[in-house]
Image (tube, rainbow, N blue to C red):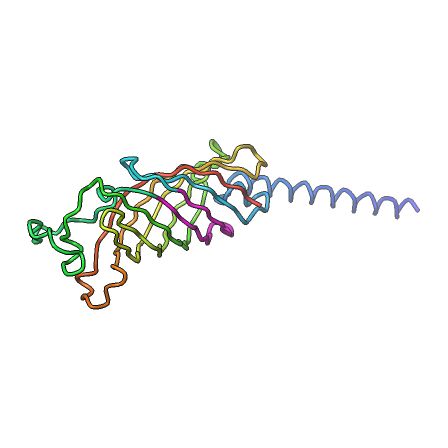
Amino acid sequence: MKFALLMLSLIFNVVVVQNADANSVQDIINTATQTSPQNIDHRHYWLELNLKSDISFQEKGFAIGVGHRWDWFGVDVRGLYGKTSYGAIEGFVDPSQDVSTGNQSPNTGAQSILARSSSDSWSYTALEPGISIESKWFPTILPLFSEKARVGMEWGNFNDSVNNLSFTGYLFTCDATLIYQLSAHSPYSISASIFWDTGNLMLNGASTLSDADRHLAVNWLGTSVGLLYSF
């Protein structure tokens, strides 16, 4: 009987020590991990609402998104809507183009040399799938912060309100984001981002024009702030 009790005591002590060791190892992993704080709480999905503006703060827009993160890799899709000005999204200028010939009909001339004012109003709606990597650069001193880099492709409708022209946009986008979890186990986080969009717009309803005449380059830097809910 005494021998049986001794064996049970030894087994109990071994289990307790093993559990303590396991917890200690897990604590070390959680402290030094490069994954998001939300992942530690097993929240791998998120919803987000972002308010967007270009770097000159002329754009007014928002994005609603949903995504899934693994240890450090994530996928998501966003829906975007915004209003901006041509000067805020204007693409790189080709010095070889003679802008003095820009006063021509939008239906017969190249969009890239059509005379436009930087204050011309534009609007857009777009769908933007993307992939991202998220990690903690300073897990010990800033345990509630994580950093995310994201790239995506943007497809949507862009409208030149002044000239009453509609374009289909094909853009590449990338952004860098700083995320702050509101408390150690909160599902809510706030974010601040800087992004870059670049690509081509193609004039709609102009099948008789060449691609070169329908083409319009766009390029802009922007910022956004957002609220994320992880679950």
State the residue at coordinates (88%, 47%): 3
Q: Is residue 227 above or below residue 158?
A: above
State the residue at coordinates (76%, 42%): 13
Counting from the top left corner in percent of width and height, residue 207 is at: 24, 67
In the rendered image, which quarter is residue 222 located in? top left
- Outermost residue toward the right in this view: 1
Of 113 and 131, which appears nearest the observer? 113
- Outermost residue toward the bottom in this view: 208
Counting from the top left corner in percent of width and height, residue 51 is at: 40, 39
Of 176 and 24, which appears nearest the observer? 176
Q: Is residue 173 above or below residue 142?
A: below
Position of 91 compared to 72: left or right? left
Q: Is residue 221 above or below residue 94?
A: above
Of 164 and 207, which appears nearest the observer? 164
In the rendered image, which quarter is residue 109 located in? bottom left
Of 83 and 135, which appears nearest the observer? 83
Counting from the top left corner in percent of width and height, residue 48 is at: 48, 44
* Magenta-drawn stretch, dominant element (helix, strand or loop): strand
Please tell me how many numbered marks the rendered image carries: 0
Position of 29 compared to 21: left or right? left
Counting from the top left corner in percent of width and height, residue 49 is at: 46, 42
Position of 59 compared to 29: left or right? left
Q: Magenta residues, as a range?
A: 62-82
State the residue at coordinates (35%, 39%): 60
Give yes or no for residue 184 being in the magenta stretch. no
Q: Is residue 205 above or below residue 161?
A: below
In the rendered image, which quarter is residue 53 located in? top left
